[in-house]
Amino acid sequence: MKSLHDMPERPGPARASLDRLFELTEVLGALMQRGMADRGLTLARAGVLWALFHDGPMTQRALAAARGVTPRNVTGLLDALQEEGLVAREAHPTDRRATLVSLTPKGREFTAGLRGGRDELAALLFADLPPERLDTFAATLVLAIERLKDVDPTAHA
Amino acid sequence: MKSLHDMPERPGPARASLDRLFELTEVLGALMQRGMADRGLTLARAGVLWALFHDGPMTQRALAAARGVTPRNVTGLLDALQEEGLVAREAHPTDRRATLVSLTPKGREFTAGLRGGRDELAALLFADLPPERLDTFAATLVLAIERLKDVDPTAHA
DNA sequence: ACTACATAGTGAAGTCACTTCACGATATGC
DNA sequence: GCATATCGTGAAGTGACTTCACTATGTAGT
């Protein structure tokens, strides 16, 4: 006998879909990681930049909440990004304990490039599919995401 | 002005779908990580166990190829799994350089639990959806996965 | 105003996944 | 036999995390 999978056992559509989700998570995660490495940084650091691009300047605490990591970790990520000249730490106008983090012009340029890459990828993946099919696809994804969040209430917004 | 996103700009279905894929990657990745942590191990180690469960005993080199990591890394992951009594290293019958890695009974028990959890999750996510809709969903996922692999030829099988 | 407590950021120390490089032990081709 | 490729691992290093302790500051409560 070779393995437990010599018996096909016909997975059923629910399991087949979930297995595809696992596969996609793996492939897309790897692609993102490689894409960021090509641009000279890591996924975690790029995530911080993206949060700042998306929501504007904020404190490190807010950044930690937005990215779902500890404040201490944000400190380290920002140290690296600041070294690269992509973000700037300024004094918070009203709270002298806090630091206000914002994108530098170079950081804005970088995130604009990210956004462009995302739009390119979206076109490459889905441009030829009928909008109606895509809408159903996205709706099913939303359903799955919602239910996944219910399974693990620790997930962030 | 608050942020760049005050202008809704109607993303379009392709970008909306891709953004959902990103979101799903994040949520599902977090869920898997937490699930493994609850069971006392990490994602990377569980991936090794799953590969052994799926494909049977193999050398560390084959394991490295299967998981898409360096052989050196496999050594470390196996050290930990062996410590936990989940895998066993045996001498390869014909090649005295190689080590044959297999699941212990405890390891088989563990992976059986993983498989059960996966099937439960599949039911929880998708059991109430019509099979036809799930088939279309999975087909669209396959399409996306294929195209993603084309973008980054470094991706593994 | 003074004490009490919560909060913002960071140093220290540690874990885990991962890498590259070097090395000893085998296998293999000619 | 001898060159050469391959298998696993030690050594050393990076990056993303964590927890814990500590300082500096804001926010009450009386």
Image: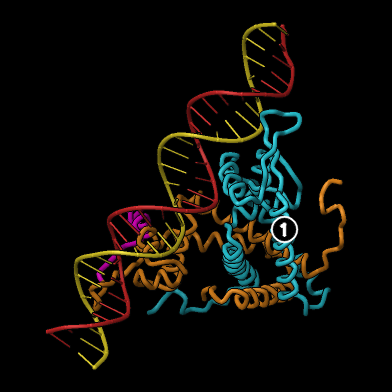
Chain colours: A cyan, B orange, C yellow, D red
Left/right of residue B81 with respect to residue B115 in the rendered view: left
Left/right of residue B14 with respect to residue B34 in the rendered view: right
Is B89 inside the magenta-drawn segment? yes
Front-lying residue, B14 or A18 = B14
Q: Quadrant of residue B48?
A: bottom left
Specify few, some or many for label 1: CA neighbours under 10 Å numbering under 14, 14-19, or 20 or more.
Answer: few
Mark 1, residue position: A109
Locate residue B150, reporting x and y percent: 61, 78
For label 1, the SS is helix
Is A1 inside the magenta-drawn segment? no
Left/right of residue B106 with respect to residue A58 in the rendered view: left
Q: Which residues are magenta?
A: B78-91
Left/right of residue B27 with respect to residue B68 in the rendered view: right
Is residue A28 in view? yes
Is residue B119 in view? no
Above or below, B7 against A17 in this view is above
Locate residue B7, reporting x and y percent: 87, 56
Front-lying residue, A69 or A25 = A69
Which amino acid, by three-letter code, is at mark 1?
A: Glu
Locate residue A100, reporting x and y percent: 70, 38
Locate residue A12, reporting x and y percent: 62, 73
Q: Quadrant of residue A36?
A: bottom right
User: Mark 1 — on which chain does it sit?
Assistant: A
Residue drawn at (38%, 67%) of the image: B71
